[in-house]
Image: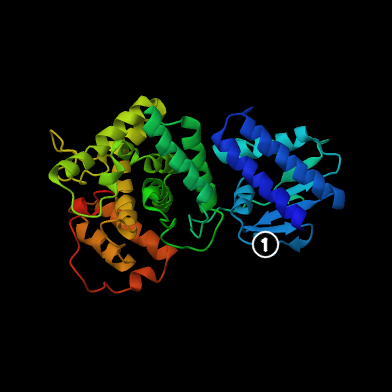
Amino acid sequence: MNEAIRFLQAVAKQLSVARLYRAGHPEREHSLDSAYQCLRTLLEIDPRPVFTFLEGDVVYNDRPVSELRQWEWAGRLAGIEMERLEIEGRVTIGELRAFLEEANARLAMGLNQDLPREPSLDSAVRYGPVSVLGEKQHRAPPLATMGLNLEDELEVAAFLHAHADSHGEIPRAEAIGVVQLLSAAMHSQQDVILPLVELKEVDQYSATHSVNVSVLSMGLAESIALASADVRAVGEAALLHDVGKTVIPLEILNKPGKLTTEEWQTIQEHPVEGARILLASGPRFALAATAAYEHHIGWTGDKGYPALHYARQPQRLSRLIQVCDIYDALRTRRPFRPPWPVARTLHHLQEEMGEYLDPEFVTAFLSMIRQWEPLVLKQSEPEGEPAEPVQAASATG
């Protein structure tokens, strides 16, 4: 059993590495070699291992693997119609590579309308969906739900911000890939846990916040029945909405006390800087650039920042992301304040509905949270200080 677990963990590592390095890179080749060596060790004791990935769990041959219960990669592989994996002892490293490349391609691009490539009939690595009486099951994916382990996605988000800081642009493949993986992870779990990714270190805030807002925004987009391609576009824009903060000194972003006038002006530059970085990254990010520029502008166009020469309503995408942005920003611990309780945060969104926030998306967000966390909206608003204005409360959100 231990050798089977080591092999699966090596596969997960190779798929993670493949998102960060191009084909042929030494790190990618090294992780492939490690996975193959783990497989050869497994084959010495089991010449024909069979793995099944269902509902986030792993079954090895006919035994559940308790050590990998609710393993995130089980859900991801099942989500790309690789619910079953069979390997014969004659397997070559080339056949393992072909399987991993196909898995990586499906994770990056999604199944969409294109039929996934099936393994060749003579391959020693066989994979596909679990079938009933020889027929493929067609199960509708559940609405986006949480309870996720998003550590790998968090690492990629941190890489995107670091790359933007050092190169002034966003790497296209990694941005697309992490959104596809977030989408797959959302549909692999059934239990909801909010907040999604807990902040562990102060300097992790930008990456943690971007992942949370991306997942929340895709969930909200699904809840209002946007097409799958539009949901992914929303997720990508949400992931990158705060990329302009990479040019702001950390001592300002993480300042525990009140900002000076000059520091607040610096903070207010991040939407413009974010749009500039995204526009420099190519036409793929034009929509994300719009959201980055507009996500702190009130829904009527006459509040927030940057100030518009002529008041106009921000794009629907920006207004949708703004609700999720403020929710996660207020729910996250920051150096200058503790996290707000869920009930207080939701009450605050309701207070700003029609003032600073678009009523359509606040209403849809509250409905989504009610479905994800049925008990959340039954909590009473805790006593305490009145809610701060959205512009100030979410200044670094």
Q: Would residue 145 appear left or right of 361 to someone viewing this image?
A: right
Pick the front one: 221 or 34 = 34
The residue lying furthest to the front in this view is 251
**Image side of residue 207 versus residue 396, left or right:** right
- Label 1 crowd (10 A; few <14 / some 14-19 / many >=20): few
x and y percent of residue 186 in the render?
Answer: 51, 52
| The image quarter in which residue 282 lies | top left
Where is 119 relative to 367, above or below?
above
Picture residue at 50% right of the left edge, 60% below the top: 147
Instruction: Give the camera-side residue of 200 and 78.
Output: 200
Please report the residue visible at 13 percent of the width from the left and 33 percent of the height from the top.
309
Residue 327 position within the rendered picture, expressed as x and y whole percent measured from the top left: 32, 56
Q: Secondary structure at mark 1?
A: helix
Which one is in front, 297 or 231? 297
Residue 130 in sight in this render: no
Q: Amino acid at mark 1?
A: Glu
Label 1: which residue? 67
In percent of width and height, residue 87 lies at 80, 45
| Residue lying at 80% horizontally and 49% vertically, measured from the top left | 42
Coordinates of residue 321 in the picture (x, y in percent)? 33, 47
State which quadrant residue 133 falls in.
bottom right
Can residue 90 be seen?
yes
Picture layout, residue 133 above or below residue 94: below
Q: Is residue 117 above or below residue 77?
A: above
